[in-house]
Image (cartoon, rainbow, N blue to C red):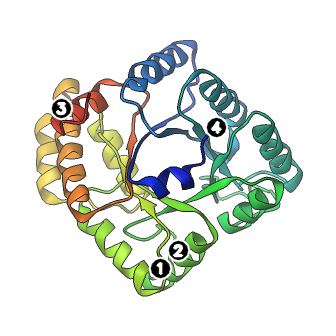
Amino acid sequence: MTRISDLLAKGPTWSFEFFPPKTPEGMASFDQAVTDLSALEPAYVSITYGAGGTARDTTYDLVVRVNEQQAFPAMPHLTCVGHTRAELVDLLEAYREHGVENVLALAGDPPKDGSDPGGDFVYATELVALAREVGDFSVGVAAFPEVHPRSTDRATDRRFLAAKLNAADFGMTQFFWNADHYRVMVEELAALGCTTPVLPGVMPFVSVAGARRMSAMNNTDIPDWLQERMDQVDGDGEATRQLGVEVATKLIGDLLEIGVPGIHLYAMNRAQSIQEIYDNLGLRR
């Protein structure tokens, strides 16, 4: 397969993110979306991991299957929360045996009830080190343009983020609604001597309630103008989806003007919105 670090060294990449379905119907939608979006020739795709590792087996199966069936590699998300070192070693070794060369190393979210999730690791940097030890993976880590929701202050957040990125091959951001957040983050990282490429994550939302809920969870600011537009389409599924496409298209245009190492689009296990974004930007061959 192909290492993402090598792809980034050649120029900007376009990639998509999927999540592991929970039902047979969801799996059919996943398969259809991957098939439809393969025509856009992504550099790679990523597949997320359930909270606390709840979708570990499904993520593993999907990553292996996509790698075997598609011309582009699939990168698994992998979290520390709730896993022993031995479990993580076994999973990384299994990925290597199936030719997987890329992994996104995440700390993971603690249980919502505040209970101890267990596990041997706490920080993503520990998982990065383990991936390096187990195999020659190309390792990515997460970045929050508006600082991590559990950060105590911005300066500390940026120092920790720079250290994490310096240990990895690339970063991928949580979604955001204003390109200036990404631009300022990159400038702050550069001031700390960190030049690791960070890919902006862009979410063409399909639900007003979902976009607001996830924004609140991640401490992501929704601009007043977007709140007003969301109010106008709330309750109309297709109008909401079209607004998500419009907002994502504009955001990507702003990011391309800044000059980014790539664009990572949240596919939401659907193809239509991404296909329309590609058409809006004149990207579809």
Task: Determine which quarter of the picture holds residue 224.
Answer: bottom left
Q: Provide the secondary structure element on which disc 3 rests.
A: helix
Residue pictured at 85% horizontal, 44% vertical: 90
Q: CA gap, disc 4 to disc 3?
A: 35 Å
Number of other residues with Cα within 10 Å of mark 4, as a class: few under 14, some 14 to 19, many 20 or more: some
Direction from residue 93 to residue 260 in the image, left or right? left
Quarter in which the N terminus is drawn = top right
Q: Nearer the viewer, mark 4 or mark 3?
A: 4
Q: Provide the secondary structure element on which disc 4 rests.
A: loop
Direction from residue 114 to residue 273 in the image, left or right? left
Q: Amino acid at mark 1?
A: Arg
Pointer 2: what residue?
Answer: 161
Q: Earlier in the sequence, mark 3 or mark 2?
A: 2
Direction from residue 118 to residue 187 in the image, left or right? left
Query: Residue 54 appears at what percent x and percent y?
Result: 68, 38
Number of other residues with Cα within 10 Å of mark 3, as a class: few under 14, some 14 to 19, many 20 or more: some
Residue pictured at 58% horizontal, 24% vertical: 22
